Structures are given as C-alpha cells and as structure tokens.
Amino acid sequence: MAVLIALAVVAAIAGYAAARVLLERNTMCRLPFLNVVSFAVTGALMLLLPHPLTIVACAAYFVGSTLESNAIASTWAGGIRKHE
Amino acid sequence: MLAEGLRILIAACVCWLNFVTIDVFFGLPKEGGVSGATAIAQEIERKGGAIHGGYMMGNIVSSPDASAGTLLASCGVYAAGIPGGLFAAVLVYIGNRICYDPGYAGTTGTITATFIVYAFTQAGFLASDFIAGMIIAILTIQGISHVHASRLLATLWRWRS
C-alpha cells in the first residue's frame, strides 16, 4: 500500500515534469525539467520491479539519460570547451 | 507508525538536506563542469536567476551528482539493503567517469545516503519513501522555478564561500 502511494507521487511528478518539458520553449531550460523526468522514471522502475538487478537497470537508464542531456547541452553550447 | 504521506514528506526533507549539503560542500555551484552546464547557468541567469545556483543546476543535469546518488542509494537499499546502496555507489562512480565528471560528489552522496536511508528503515520508514522523497526533493530544485531555485542555491554557496 505504501509503495502504491510512493508510486502515485512518482508518477504524478513524472507527468507534471513531462508537461513542463513540452510547454517550455527554451531548449536549455527544458533540460532541468527533463532531468526531473529521468529521476521519476528511475524511481518508478525500481518501485515496479523490486529486484537487486534493477539497481543496474536504474543506474544504466539514469546515467544514459544524464549523458544525453550533457551531450545536448554541450552541443547546443558550441561543443567541447578547452580547459587551460 | 507514521502515515505514508508524512513519511514521504520527511524523507523528502532528509534527501534534500543530504544532496544539497554534499553538492555545495563539493563546490558544484562554483563553475560549470562541462560547457553544457555553463550554458544552462547562463540561460538561467539571463532569465533573472543567480549564476552560481545555475552552475549547480547545470551540473546536476550534466552528471550524476549527490542527488542522483541519493536516489540510486534509496533504490539500492530498497532492493538489497546496505550492499545494494554500496553497489549503487560503484555504479554512480562509473557514471561520473562516463559523464566527464572528475569529482566525487555523486559517490560520496550515494554512500552517505545509503547509511541515512538504512538508519531510517530501522526507525519505521520504508526505502520506497526515500525514492518518492528524493523525487519531490529534485522537483523543488529543478522542476518548479529555475529562477528562485538558483537564487536559493547561490545564497547557500555564498554561506559556504
């Protein structure tokens, strides 16, 4: 029962953040909302599939989505910045 | 035994304090780790936010930091107890390196969160409360108002430095 409430909270936040992603016009400002969606999907994955191996799936999904956001933001910003 | 909703709200506060403290301690608001994080910070500043808060938000988007660590530690403890949380720390460490992040905020946050979540499970909380709580915590930073969240984080950064 408690897990159902947690799952409802996670699903509601995922839906809200997804709506904000669609409504936001600026690509850079979309990424933090997309980040919330990634968090919520990772949490939902674990709540729906409680198994030790799901940790690997959660980490793989989360790191993958973060790397995509990183790539989109960095490409939009003009590619690799050279550190001195 | 507290009601589920109240437990989730308390868990959200605990998660928020854990990840914000560790991220600020590790200096995430100092500068953007990659050019994308800097670009997100500049965009938030252009809208009226604070640049240092924007850097931290950009860094959270660009690499698994302590917030991701707290979530994955909660997931780990939910599935397999303390070993699950520590396994999540290894995965976050690998994730940091994949995302060109040289720091240890994510790994440290995962380890501290593992023990915090485990301690709370001994006090009648469920690890699932912390999964939902962490998602509420990240919503308050990244998902409601970028301008206000960045100003709050910049204030915390000023206190630290």
Image: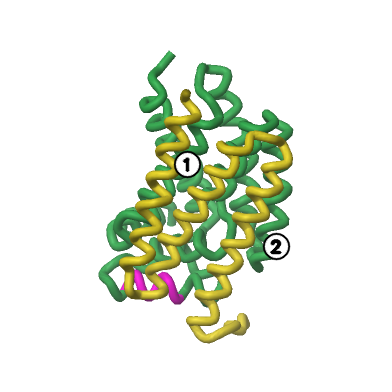
Chain colours: A yellow, B green
- Horizontal arrangement in the rendering, residue B114 relative to residue B159 (left or right): right
Quadrant that contains the N terminus of chain B: top left
In this rendering, position of residue B9 left or right of residue A68: left
| Amino acid under disc 2 | Arg
- Residue at 71%, 47% in the rendered image: A56
For residue B134, the mark is 1
User: Residue at left 47%, top 23%?
Assistant: A1
Disc 2 is attached to a residue of which chain?
A: B
Question: Which quadrant holds the C terminus of chain B?
Answer: bottom left
How crowded pointer 1 is (Cα within 10 Å; few <14, some 14-19, many 20+) is rated as many
Give x and y (percent) for residue B42.
38, 75
Front one among A22 and B33: A22
Percent position (x, y) of residue B70? 56, 43
Would you place residue B103 above or below residue A27 in this image? above
Q: Nearer the viewer, residue B112 or A76?
A: A76
Q: Which residues are magenta?
A: B39-45
N-terminal label among 2 and 1: 2
The residue at 44%/40% (across/down) is B17
Q: In the depicted view, which residue is nearer to us: B23 or B123?
A: B123
Parent chain of label 1: B
Residue topped by disc 2: B97
**Element under disc 2:** helix
